[in-house]
Image: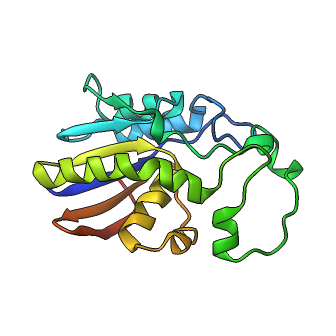
């Protein structure tokens, strides 16, 4: 059960991306993603739901909270991978071994870096955290990059957030308190 003061960062279900890098590409949930969402079932109510406009996120939010009002926010889109967008993972360039700081600053030609994504996402994360402090729990249904941005905000260190792998249809729980955030769970399952 979710409680007041919690910010729930939920990654969308598995997608029908066909092995492609899909940040801004709007793809549907896969059959496996839909099955996992159906098996998860409806969740206990939350005070607010923020959602990326991506179809995969909207479908996930609808499956978790059928009929609930949600606030779609374009700042919650996944990282824009530029020239790498919608390319097969096997066709992406080999960038070699990078430090976490270098990885955080890496961009596909014409895209944005993880650092750029964090700059874009942090204001909505802070708004949602304040709403959670006031009455929560508050859910954000978005992408792996957005969840990592939330972890970066809680850690106060952007580079360390790059170390987390974020599973599809997982919930990362942050506790929101006056003056900050703490990390309660990463890649948790729904109750």
Total number of numbered discs in the rendering: 0
Q: Residue at x 60, y 33 (%)?
A: 30
Colour scheme employed for the rendering of this structure: rainbow
Q: Is residue 64 left or right of residue 22?
A: left
Query: Does the rendering let one see residue 169?
Result: no
Q: Position of residue 3 (x, y in %)?
A: 15, 55
Q: Where is residue 181 drawn, in percent x and y?
A: 27, 67
Q: Is residue 79 left or right of residue 12?
A: right
Please indicate whether residue 140 sits to the left or right of residue 164 in the image.
left
Please indicate whether residue 23 sits to the left or right of residue 46 in the image: right
Q: Position of residue 180 (x, y in %)?
A: 25, 68
The residue depicted at 35 percent of the width and 51 percent of the height is 125
Q: In the rendered image of this protein, does residue 46 appear above or below residue 59?
A: below
46 over 133 or under it: above or below: above
Quadrant hosting residue 174: bottom left
Residue in view at x 65 percent, y 55 percent: 113
The residue depicted at 16 percent of the width and 66 percent of the height is 178
The location of residue 87, given as percent across then percent down, is: 81, 41
Image height of 186 relative to 133, above or below? below
- Is residue 181 in view from this perspective? yes
Quarter holding residue 70 = top left
């Amino acid at each position: 059960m979710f409680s007041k003061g919690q910010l729930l960062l939920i990654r969308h279900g598995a997608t029908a991306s066909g092995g492609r890098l899909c940040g801004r590409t709007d793809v549907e949930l896969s059959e496996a993603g839909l099955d996992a969402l159906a098996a998860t079932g409806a969740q206990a109510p939350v005070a607010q739901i923020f959602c990326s406009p991506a179809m995969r996120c909207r479908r996930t939010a609808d499956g978790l909270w059928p009929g609930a009002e949600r606030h779609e926010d374009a700042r919650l889109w996944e990282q824009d991978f530029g020239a790498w967008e919608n390319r097969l993972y096997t066709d992406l360039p080999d960038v070699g071994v990078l430090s976490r700081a270098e990885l955080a600053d890496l961009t596909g030609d014409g895209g944005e870096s993880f650092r750029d994504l964090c700059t874009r996402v942090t204001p909505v994360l802070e708004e949602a955290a304040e709403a959670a402090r006031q009455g929560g729990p508050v859910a954000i249904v978005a992408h792996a990059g957005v969840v990592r941005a939330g972890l970066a905000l809680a850690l106060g260190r952007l580079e360390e957030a790059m170390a987390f792998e974020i599973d599809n249809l997982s919930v990362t729980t942050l506790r929101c308190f006056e003056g900050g955030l703490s990390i309660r769970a990463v890649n948790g399952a729904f109750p």
